[in-house]
Amino acid sequence: MLDSSGGFNVGGRTISSPQDPNLTLTCDHGYVEYFLPWKPRKTSLFMWHSSSTQTFQNRYDGGEGFKDKFLRRDYPVYLWDAPRLGRANWACEPTYYVPDYRDQGNFLAWNFGPSPGNFWNDTQFPAENATAWEQITGSRYVEYDTVANVWLQAQAAAVAADSYKVGDNIVYLGNSASGLRAQLTAVLSNTTNIKGIVAYEGFGYVLPDNLNVTRSGPFGPIIVPLEQFKKLAKLSLVQYIFSDHRPENFIFLTQARQSAKLINMYGGNAQILRLGQDAGLKGSTHIAFADMDNDKVAGLLDNLLEKNRLDGYVDDDNDDNGDDGDEGGHDSPH
């Protein structure tokens, strides 16, 4: 049963017109849409897309998506549009858009098959469903993949995390480029409200500054001071998930292994999960939570949260997940 739903802006700033300082624009904020169960669990699932909120709202064929699956499991759900994306698209700086013919490139990036239009035989995308293809390609937002935007979006998410408006036991569900931003958010946060990161094929990683790595790009690495990086080791869980048909030398899998090794070296709990090899979910795609077998993908997340004692209820006196903080974190944000 749903207790309440709504939305609110987070972060941002107000700028004045260079021509007339009396004219202002509120911009560079993020937008949160929330869904709160009547009897909530303590852990909030903060669903951070890298193309459209629709990826969390529906399965590829329009079936039930992660948003509703986990609401039914009594998890508070927050859908996030980061600054300059979707419902938070007012930018404080000039932006520029021209048509970018990327459907075929996304076919490959989303791991639907080895070449555009050539689906893997076991793909979990409904290959014969033309409407599904139109939906996934048409649902994308305009994205500005720059290092500055990585920081802007992570800083806004950190404001949200530290505000207690999205709970005080937060697990980020990221995908693609948002996995990098979720890591940076955990590094920038000034509270202990963030408990975990589950990144479905994260493209980009945060690294400490003691590795003699200086290059930085919109798909990582993002270099931070070592002491800040160690915040990732204080999370209850970090899981990097990769879909089927990814070779061992896939660049982001290699980077994920490096990240997990470093997090664990500093006492953290990071792991790699390969859906095909480790979980037997053959044909899984880049956006596995929208796959036709997303029930099984959701089951893996169920087990992960339970294993790390992040599945308790707010009103469960017997819950001992170690967090005795403000249980009002899941009240309506307004």
Image: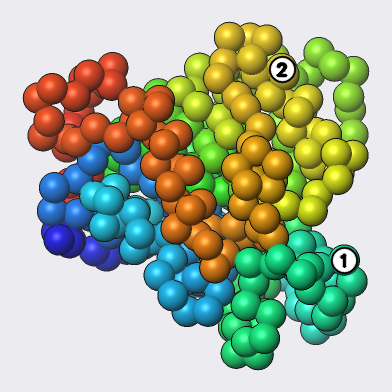
| Residue 78 placement (x, y as % from top left) | 37, 54
Q: Quadrant of the N terminus?
A: bottom left
Judging depth in this view, the residue of 328 and 253 nearest the camera is 253
Label 1, label 2: how far apart the Cα atoms are = 32 Å
> In terms of secondary structure, where does tag 1 sit?
loop
Q: Residues within 10 Å of mark 2 (few under 14, many from 20)?
A: some
Residue sitting at 44 percent across and 58 percent down?
295
**Residue 299 visible in the snapshot:** yes
Question: For residue 42, which quarter of the picture?
Answer: top left
Residue sitting at 52 percent across and 62 percent down?
293
Q: Residues within 10 Å of mark 1 (few under 14, many from 20)?
A: few
| Residue 191 placement (x, y as % from top left) | 40, 25
Q: Which mark is residue 240?
A: none
> In terms of secondary structure, where does tag 2 sit?
helix
Q: Is residue 301 left or right of residue 259?
A: left
**Residue 26 visible in the snapshot:** no
Q: Amino acid at mark 1?
A: Pro
- Residue indicated by mark 2: 262
Judging depth in this view, the residue of 288 and 314 nearest the camera is 288
